[in-house]
Structure formats: structure tokens, C-alpha cells
Image (spheres, rainbow, N blue to C red):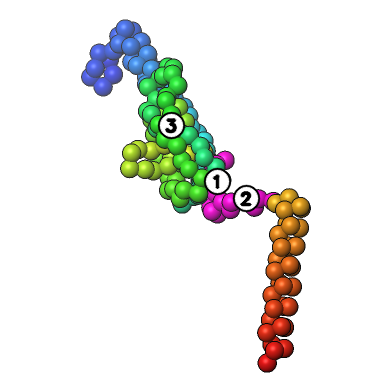
Amino acid sequence: MGSFGGVKVDMQNLTEAVELAQEKALFQQKLIDQNRVNTLSQSLEDYRFGLLNANFPDGKYYVTSNFNTQLVVPYKGGFTGVEPVLRQFKRGELINVITIPANTVYGLVKVIKTDSGNFYADQNKLSKTKPVDPVTTESLSETRAKNVNKTTVMIIGAFILGFLLSND
């Protein structure tokens, strides 16, 4: 075909050079597209992490009602089956909730940090304020009977005190 800059160029070399250039351009485009996908994926992950922290920030929480929870188990792909209940948290217990990056389906999870491991945190069972024990309502007849007894004791006590003071 000829020479260019002292290099002999034939049709086969030219075709290979063009194919390599096209492959390089496609590879560069794939890298650009993959970077866009990774950036978008990271943005969505950051957004999800931000939502997780905004609605349920790390910190100390009181357990508002007893609940069972499981140990955070790394996700190995496929169905792992139901894990046994490994920990029960009692009402009124003060616990520390943190976000940890875990190799789970969701990537980031809120956990209750304990000496025996990290357990899934249940936002619906946790509160920043200590739970107040419910007030038991007495029946109206029980309240009336107590009041009558107190009144009777007060009247008898007043008569005795009056009697003792009048004898002086």
C-alpha cells in the first residue's frame, strides 16, 4: 500500500490499527459508562445511608417493649434460612445503637452493639425517652371504699383529740 514515515504500511496493518483504535474507543466509553453507574450507585447508597441516619440516628435508646432480635450475619448470597433468635432486649433497657457497614443485602444496617455481638436494631421498639409504666386504674368502688375508710379514721381521730383537749 505504501510507506509512511519510514514504516511500510499495508492493508492488513491499516485494518488492524483501525480495529484497535475502535476497540480502544469502545473500551474508553465502557469505562466512562461504568464510572457513571458507579457514581450513581454510590450516590444512591449515600442517599439511603443519609435517610437511615436522618430518621434513626446513632445513639443511646431505651427499649420501649420487649423484643427479640438476631445477630447480624454476613450475607453470602442465596437463601441462608432463618437465623435463630439470639438475644432478647427488655423494656426499659438502655442500649447503644450504631450504623455499621455489613456484608448484607442492604450494605448498611443499624445494630445494637453488645459484648456478645451486633444485633439488628428495631426502630419501632426504641425511643430516646425512658418508657413510663402504665398507671393502673382502680375501680370506682375500690377508690370510694378507701376514701370512706380514711374519712372514718379522721373523724374518730378528731373526736379523740377533742376529748383529750377538753379534759384539761
- The residue indicated by pointer 3 is 70
Q: Nearer the viewer, residue 132 or 137?
A: 137
Tell me where the magenta segment starts and ends, as one range.
123-137
Say few, some or many: other residues with alpha carbon within 10 Å of mark 1 (under 14 / 14 to 19 / 20 or more). many
Magenta stretch: helix, strand or loop mostly: loop
Given the image, on which type of amino acid does mark 3 rest? Gln
> Between disc 3 and disc 1, whose residue precedes?
1
Q: Nearer the viewer, residue 14 or 23?
A: 23
Q: Position of residue 127 (x, y in %)?
A: 55, 49
Q: Position of residue 55 (x, y in %)?
A: 56, 45
Residue drawn where x is 45% and y is 37% of the image: 88
> Between disc 2 and disc 1, whose residue precedes?
1
**Dot label at residue 118:** none
Residue 89 belongs to magenta span:
no
Marks 3/2 in contact by CB < 8 Å: the verdict is no
Tell whether 128 sits left or right of 14. right
Residue drawn where x is 41% and y is 19% of the image: 80
Given the image, on which type of amino acid does mark 1 rest? Thr
Label 3 SS:
loop
**Dot label at residue 134:** 2
Mark 2 and mark 1: Cα distance apart in space: 12 Å
Residue drawn where x is 50% and y is 49% of the image: 92
Q: Position of residue 141 (x, y in %)?
A: 76, 52
Mark 3 and mark 1: Cα distance apart in space: 18 Å
Task: In the displayed orientation, state which residue is furthest to the front.
Answer: 167
Indicate which label's residue lies in the foreground, 3 or 1: 1
Label 1 SS:
loop
Task: In the displayed orientation, state which residue is furthest to the bottom.
Answer: 168
**Dot label at residue 64:** 1
Indicate which label's residue lies in the foreground, 2 or 1: 2
